[in-house]
Image (cartoon, grey):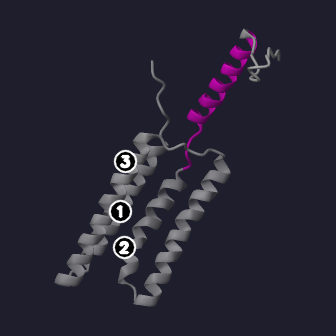
């Protein structure tokens, strides 16, 4: 690699061939990342673990709290195993951050609705509905956020 560093600029200057080779290498890595499939166990695990969270409210108080903490730990472990096995860490583009933030607000609102149904009206079925919707939303969003990104034409 040639460097044409002057006393004012200490950044190495690449030749055209070196720059082109570096760009080809970056494009190859990006293509490999886009082509890497997500294992189906990951969205299923995230959906099941997050769906069990509303149902843990129905357990007696000390056990329900322990189960809730264990479920959060399970989600963290599933994410860590996926990242370790795939070696891919998503940068979390703006679209993903907005979608996941809105989903979190929706799911918290859903659990708040289940709480109102349970405490105010004694209807515990709200927790089951909350769990089912939570599972579907988390499964769908996990697939959505891990789908291959499209190259702009």
Q: Quadrant of residue 145?
A: top left
Distance CA(mark 2)–CA(mark 3): 21 Å
> Of residues 6 and 115, which is closer to you in this image?
6
Comparing labels 1 and 3, the label whose residue is closer to the camera = 3
> In this view of the protein, which residue sits in the foreground, 41 or 77?
77
Q: Is residue 76 magenta?
A: no
In the displayed structure image, the side of residue 43 where residue 118 appears, left or right? left
Q: Examine the rendered structure and indicate whether residue 1 appears above or below residue 90.
A: above
Answer above or below: position of 139 versus 1: below
Mark 2: secondary structure: helix
Q: Secondary structure at mark 1?
A: helix
Please provide the residue range marked out in magenta. Answer: 17-39
Q: Please state if 8 lies on the left or on the right of 126 as rendered.
A: right
Is 20 located above or below residue 122 in the figure?
above
**Relative to 117, 15 lies left or right:** right
Residue at 22%, 77% in the rendered image: 116
* Mark 2 or mark 3, whichever is nearer to me: 3
Label 1 – label 2 distance at C-alpha: 8 Å
Q: Position of residue 76 (x, y in %)?
A: 56, 63
Residue at position x 42%, y 47% from top? 97
Residue to which mark 3 is pinned: 99
Nearest to N terminus: mark 1 or mark 3: 3
How far apart, in angstroms, are the residues tagged by discs 1 and 3?
15 Å
Most common SS among magenta residues: helix
Residue identified by numbered label 2: 54
Residue lying furthest front: 8
| Residue 109 position in % (x across, y down) | 28, 65
- The quarter of the rendered structure image containing the C terminus is top left
* Residues marked 1 and 2 touching at CB (< 8 Å): yes
């Amino acid at each position: 690699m040639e460097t044409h560093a002057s006393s004012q600029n200490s950044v190495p200057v690449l030749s055209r061939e070196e720059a082109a080779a570096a760009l080809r290498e970056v494009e190859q890595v990006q293509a490999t990342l886009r082509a890497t499939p997500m294992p189906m166990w990951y969205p299923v695990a995230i959906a099941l673990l997050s769906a069990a969270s509303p149902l843990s409210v129905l357990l007696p108080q000390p056990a329900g709290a322990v189960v809730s903490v264990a479920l959060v730990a399970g989600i963290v472990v599933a994410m860590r195993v996926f990242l370790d096995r795939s070696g891919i860490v998503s940068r979390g583009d703006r679209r993903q951050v907005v979608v996941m933030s809105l989903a979190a607000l929706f799911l918290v609102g859903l659990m708040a609705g289940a709480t109102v149904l349970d405490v105010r009206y004694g209807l515990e079925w709200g927790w089951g509905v909350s769990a089912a919707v939570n599972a579907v939303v988390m499964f769908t969003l996990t697939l959505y956020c891990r789908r291959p990104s499209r190259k702009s034409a």
